């Protein structure tokens, strides 16, 4: 018998550090986004080491950052916070297990910094090095055929540090889902309600696993941050680990919130980027396997990846990992994950990820359904397995997160680019004009040995 769902009201939820600001910054808003009221300080000038955030024992009061501060993830503080989530809020680990890390061979190519490209809709060419500054890059690793050819750090990050992956997390959750589909543990045609009876009465009840994986569910749920009554604020409040307001009666925890989501439209008709799809998938994964996404990721991938570091997820008040945006890791290990996918899921002769799962992701989703979402900077793209598929000549696909997080895989060029950043504007529309052509340019250069034609 399904548990009765919560009834979600359009009650205004304050946008404070009680959880709302975290979710705001972790979901990948790629639609048009309002520019900051004033021109933000440059990457160099806003470097958290220069600004002195959280330096000293204890830091001066005006340099302290707390989770309870309403601006703890606002620019420029976010340039420190992205590397320090586990110091501010509860987390759950993703262990790499015992044993030595598998070394990444290195052959650095100093000419990459001078590589030039034309920004989207721009008139002046930009160098690769300039793009790193423009996009507030904290750490970036470029692999060519499994070899590190470029590696750079700035801001709060170094080779031994960890950084919030934001909505790159969604693609990791989607990968786990696709693995289970490829192995027959999940079936694409199964409905969510059949797997998780608690969701049978919600909008997810009659949605299929495939529709959740491709975010073609029809949900009454808005991630319009300009609207104080948008459901995203209620979801953020549900995920907070801070005490609930007395007598609020609102859902507590990600899974509790999902039970009350209502349907709006017909599943399968249009792509709609909504974080709650990923957390619904995480519940499906946990119910079918008996393991949380953090445990499953550790056992199935992280302990077999040759990772250098443990990773971790932020969690809600019940310890449920935030599968839609709470993953944190080192940038070199994120690159290792990309290389594993580039190698069709194999490492040292061992099949870690089913090749069929990667092939399905690479095939892309329904372009027509994707086009309905109106991403003007991503013409011809699609979405599948919670990955963004470029459908370009190289078959490139990527995981994307707010403030500049990216894992870019170019199968034709045998290139992987892992990047963590802290761009002052959350939306990917703020960095895509320089990010996408820069990634394509370096992939083309590494593939051909020559700079793209001007």
Image (cartoon, grey):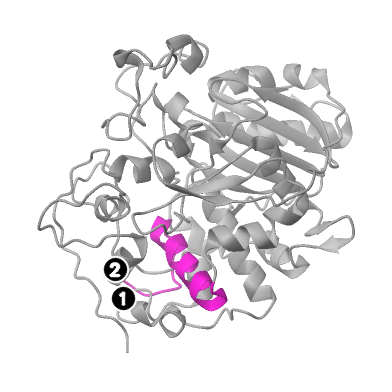
Badge 2 crowding class, 10 Å Cα cut-off, few under 14, some 14 to 19, many 20 or more, is many
Q: Quadrant of residue 186?
A: bottom right
Stretch in magenta: 264-290
Residue farthest toward the left in the current orientation of the protein:
247
Q: Quadrant of residue 193?
A: bottom left
Q: Position of residue 241 (x, y in %)?
A: 31, 49
Q: Quadrant of residue 355?
A: bottom right
Q: Residue at x 64, y 43 (%)?
A: 407
Viewed as shown, does residue 23 lie left or right of 287? left
Q: Judge by depth and name the residue closer to the eye, 167 or 158.
A: 158
Q: What residue does disc 2 label?
A: 261
Badge 1 crowding class, 10 Å Cα cut-off, few under 14, some 14 to 19, many 20 or more, is many
Label of residue 137 in the image: none
Residue 253 drawn above or below residue 428: below
Label of residue 202 in the image: 1
Viewed as shown, does residue 102 lie left or right of 134? right
Which secondary structure lies at badge 2? loop
Q: Position of residue 171 (x, y in %)?
A: 57, 55
Q: Judge by depth and name the residue closer to the eye, 374 or 398.
A: 398
Asked if residue 433 can be seen in this view, the reply is: yes
Q: Residue at x 34, y 20 (%)?
A: 64
Viewed as shown, does residue 335 lie left or right of 102? left
Q: Residue at x 74, y 16 (%)?
A: 114
For marks 2 and 1 on the same chain, the one whose residue lies earlier in the sequence: 1
Quick check: marks 2 and 1 in contact, CB under 8 Å?
Answer: yes
Q: Judge by depth and name the residue closer to the eye, 428 or 90.
A: 90
Residue 428 drawn above or below residue 269: above
Q: Position of residue 54 (x, y in %)?
A: 42, 19
Give the alpha-carbon distance from disc 2 to disc 1, as whole Å: 5 Å
Q: Judge by depth and name the residue closer to the eye, 382 or 177.
A: 177
Residue 72 drawn above or below residue 300: above
């Amino acid at each position: 018998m399904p548990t009765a769902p919560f009834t979600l009201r359009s009650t205004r939820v304050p946008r404070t550090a009680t959880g709302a600001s975290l979710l705001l910054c972790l979901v990948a808003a790629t639609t048009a986004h309002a520019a900051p009221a004033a021109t933000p300080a440059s990457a160099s000038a806003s470097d958290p080491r220069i600004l002195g955030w959280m330096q000293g024992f204890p830091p001066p009061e005006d340099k302290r950052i707390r989770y309870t501060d309403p601006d703890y993830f606002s620019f420029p503080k976010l340039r420190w916070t992205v590397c320090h989530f586990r110091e501010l809020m509860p987390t759950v680990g993703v262990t790499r297990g015992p044993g030595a890390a598998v070394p990444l061979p290195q052959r650095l190519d100093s000419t990459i910094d001078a590589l030039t490209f034309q920004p989207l809709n721009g008139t002046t060419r930009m160098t690769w090095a300039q793009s790193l500054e423009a996009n507030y890059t904290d750490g970036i690793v470029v692999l060519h055929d499994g070899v590190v050819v470029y590696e750079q750090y700035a801001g709060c990050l170094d080779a031994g540090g960890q950084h919030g992956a934001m909505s790159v997390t969604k693609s990791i959750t989607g990968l786990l889902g696709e693995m289970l589909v490829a192995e027959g543990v999940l079936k694409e045609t199964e409905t969510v309600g059949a797997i998780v009876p608690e969701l049978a009465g919600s909008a997810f009840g009659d949605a299929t696993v495939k529709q959740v994986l491709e975010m073609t569910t029809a949900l009454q749920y808005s991630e319009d941050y300009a609207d104080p009554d948008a459901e995203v604020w209620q979801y953020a409040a549900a995920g907070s680990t801070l005490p609930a307001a007395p007598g609020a009666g609102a859902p507590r925890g990600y899974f509790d919130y999902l039970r009350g989501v209502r349907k709006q439209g017909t599943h399968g008709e249009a792509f709609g980027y909504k974080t709650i799809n990923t957390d619904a998938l995480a519940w499906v994964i946990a119910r079918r396997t008996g393991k949380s996404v953090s445990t499953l990721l550790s056992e199935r991938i992280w302990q077999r990846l040759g990772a250098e570091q443990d990773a971790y997820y932020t969690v809600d008040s019940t310890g449920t990992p935030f599968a839609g945006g709470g993953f944190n890791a080192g940038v070199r290990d994120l690159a290792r994950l990309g290389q594993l996918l580039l190698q069709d899921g194999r490492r040292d002769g061992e099949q870690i990820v089913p090749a069929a799962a990667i092939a399905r992701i690479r095939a892309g989703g329904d372009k027509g359904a994707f086009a309905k979402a109106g991403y003007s900077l991503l013409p011809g793209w699609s979405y599948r397995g919670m990955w963004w598929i470029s459908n370009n000549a190289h078959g490139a696909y990527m995981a994307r997160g707010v403030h500049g997080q990216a894992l870019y895989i170019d199968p034709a060029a045998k290139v992987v680019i892992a990047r963590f950043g802290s761009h002052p504007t959350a939306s990917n529309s703020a960095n895509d004009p320089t990010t996408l052509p820069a990634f394509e340019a370096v992939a083309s250069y590494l593939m051909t040995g020559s700079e793209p034609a001007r």
